[in-house]
Amino acid sequence: MKKNMQISGMNCAHCAAKVEKALSEVPGVKKAKVDLKKARGTVKFDESQVTETALVNAVSEAGYQGVFE
């Protein structure tokens, strides 16, 4: 499954990389890409292994706020 997520609190490329890394490290995530300018991320993941809540929590633990569109 591929879903888009709005991410707030990012101010620089380092922030975007931190969020991208946090999402990528969630078991079941196949690919995560974060766009700083659009303040959004695209996550490709296996629905049977990961929940949207786990992805939102990963963003939160990295210090940012994420909401699925």
Image (cartoon, rainbow, N blue to C red):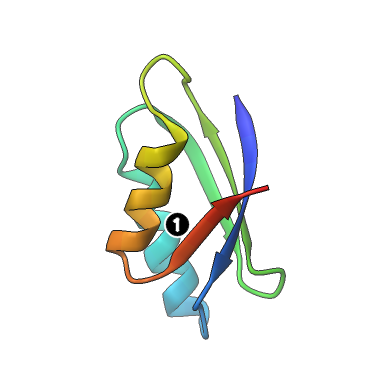
- Percent from the top left, x then y, of residue 55? 41, 44
Q: Residue at 39% of width from left, 58% of height from top?
A: 59
Q: Could you say where residue 19 lies in the image, as x and y percent from the top left?
A: 42, 62
Q: Residue at x 56, y 54 (%)?
A: 67
- Total label count? 1
**Residue furthest out toward the bottom:** 11
- Farthest top residue? 48
**Callout 1 amino acid:** Glu
> Where, by quadrant of the figure, is residue 35 drawn?
bottom right
Q: List x then y, in percent, for residue 39.
A: 64, 69
Residue appearing at x 35%, y 40% in the figure: 54
Q: Residue furthest right?
A: 38
Within 10 Å of the Cα at label 1, are there few (<14), some (14-19), or many (20+) other Cα atoms? many
Give the quarter of the image for residue 50: top left
Which residue is identified by label 1? 20
Q: Is residue 39 above or below residue 40?
A: below
- Residue shown at 30% from the left, 44% from the top: 25
Q: What percent of the width, then of the height, locates residue 37?
A: 69, 75
Q: Nearer the viewer, residue 22 or 5?
A: 5
Near-viewer residue (49 or 66) = 66
> If the image is split into quadrants, where does the N terminus sit?
top right
Q: Is residue 8 above or below residue 47?
A: below
Q: Is residue 65 left or right of residue 35?
A: left
Judge from the rendering whether residue 23 lies leftward or rightward of residue 33; answer left or right. left
Helix, strand or loop for disc 1: helix
Above-or-below relation of 42 to 10: above
**In the image, is 41 to the left or to the right of 16?**
right
